[in-house]
Amino acid sequence: MQTTTSIQPMGTFDDPRYAKLALESAGTYQSAEPFPHIAFPDFLPASLAQAVADAFPGPNSIEWIIRDNEHNLKRYQHDETMMPPLLRAMLREFNSRQFVLFLEALTGIDNLIPDPYFIGGGIHLSQPGDFLKVHADFNWHHKLHAHRRVNVLFYPNPGWQDAWGGALELWDKEMKSAQKRYFPRFNQLLVFNTDEHSNHGHPHALSCPPGQVRRTLNLYYYTTKTTEEVASPHFTLYKTEASPFATQLGTDYRKTAERG
């Protein structure tokens, strides 16, 4: 039997099945309402997903950042030096080139940049009574000087029951009602575009039993330009051809789907 310490995430997304999954799901993702999104069940190999759950720290196991106000009640930590090694390795794998290429193929958004600082992301933990009101995320990374474009949430919650609540709700632009709900079920990955109208949250207090917690790995991805931006005045800009190397990265990644 493999132990948590013997399971390593490195190379997880080299598997061609992920490229195939991204290409097959791109249309569904990009046309989804109320904004582009998708949920993937059984996303990681089962043994790795269980290892992530086993390694996830409890409420008193590490030094957490605690949010306690009218908008949210939860714990999180974005400083990877505070995390168990397996979770550090898993977060880095979600920031890897192969996973970024997976996201670009899925979302249709090129030139995504992962966040090595995990600002606002990292690992999140909610206990009975905790909540996160519906909101649109911050959109600017002051260290990267980049625009936030995509959110990725991974749920390592074995045995989660829908009756406990904790569903992430996706609301319409007008904030009239939740259009979709996704419970934080074990080994599920949720991906969605983020902008001024990607309203989401789990606004109802968790009703899970004492000792049960809602675990999440949160990762955010950025671009340095968006199509909505208006350029500042400037003189003539002489252009260079697109880098063949950069273009070929996406082409080569899509071809790996044929081996899946």
Image (cartoon, grey):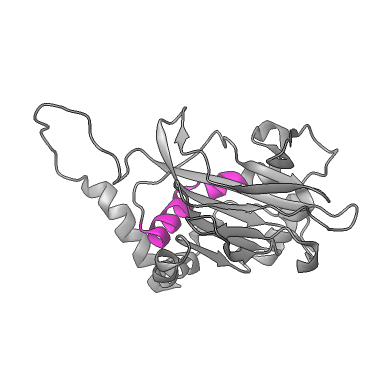
Q: Is the N terminus in the top left, top right, bottom left or bottom right quadrant?
A: bottom right
Query: Position of 196 compared to 131: left or right?
Result: left
Query: Position of 111 compared to 3: left or right?
Result: left
- Residue located 80% across and 62% down the image: 164
- Residue located 56% across and 49% down the image: 93
Q: Nearer the viewer, residue 7 or 94?
A: 94
Q: Is residue 57 above or below residue 50?
A: above
Query: Position of 71 compared to 197: left or right?
Result: right
Query: Position of 53 compared to 19: left or right?
Result: right
User: Could you tell me residue 156's position as x and y percent?
Assistant: 71, 57
The secondary structure that dominates the magenta segment is helix
Q: Nearer the viewer, residue 255 or 101?
A: 101
Residue numbers of the magenta segment: 90-108
- Residue located 49% across and 55% down the image: 174
User: Could you tell me residue 187's position as x and y percent?
Assistant: 67, 63
Q: Is residue 145 above or below residue 29?
A: above
- Residue located 72% across and 58% down the image: 166
Q: Nearer the viewer, residue 161 or 254?
A: 161
Residue 94 drawn in magenta: yes
Q: How many marks?
A: 0
Residue 107 drawn in magenta: yes
User: Could you tell me residue 72's position as x and y percent?
Assistant: 70, 42
Q: Is residue 257 above or below residue 55?
A: below
User: Could you tell me residue 145's position as x and y percent?
Assistant: 40, 30
